[in-house]
Image (cartoon, grey):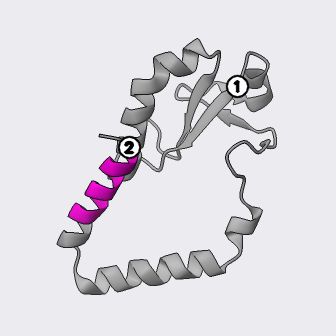
Amino acid sequence: MTLSQDLINLNTQLRAQQPEEAKLIMAKAGEDLANSGIVDNSLNVGDKSPNFTLPNAVGKLVELQDLLATGAVVISFYRGQWCPYCNLELRALQQFLPEIQKLGATLVAISPQTP
């Protein structure tokens, strides 16, 4: 099964358990986000990211330009272990990690959650 299909299945399962009021709140939040214009200012696949520096899991500062000096970088924004969608994505990326590395790229997961 593909990540896309796994995400669709998870969404279907979670929505089936969700009260109608929660579904309406989530739909409204999605509409508000879409209407905010934030997508117009977001990076797309293949766009060049501005440089940034963030601490890694052990507190060491990591700069994007340093990672790019060794090859391409695949970035995943991971909300936290509580997020089932994020967990599916990370598992899929983990499966492809050998291929990512074989292509000379680095996988980076950025999360507000500390280990």
Quick check: 86 left or right of 60? left
**Circle 1: element type:** loop
Q: Nearer the viewer, mark 2 or mark 1?
A: 2
Give the magenta part as a residue range: 3-13
Q: Quadrant of residue 51?
A: top right
- Residue flagged by tag 1: what amino acid is it? Ala
Residues tagged 2 and 1 counted as in contact (Cβ below 8 A): no
**Quadrant of residue 27 within the rendered picture:** bottom left
Name the quarter where the C terminus is drawn.
top left
Q: Residues within 10 Å of mark 1 (few under 14, many from 20)?
A: some
Which secondary structure type mostly characterizes the magenta part of the structure?
helix
Q: Residue furthest left?
A: 17
Residue at x-position 31% and y-position 48%: 6
Q: Position of residue 72 (x, y in %)?
A: 70, 25
Q: Dot 2 corresponds to which residue?
A: 3
Q: Amino acid at mark 2?
A: Leu
| Residue 91 rendering spot, x and y as whole percentages | 36, 34
Residue at x-position 76% and y-position 63%: 41
Question: Taking 71 as reference, is 33 above or below it?
Answer: below
Q: Is residue 83 visible?
A: no
Could you tell me which quadrant the N terminus lies in? Answer: top left
Q: Which residue is mark 1?
A: 72
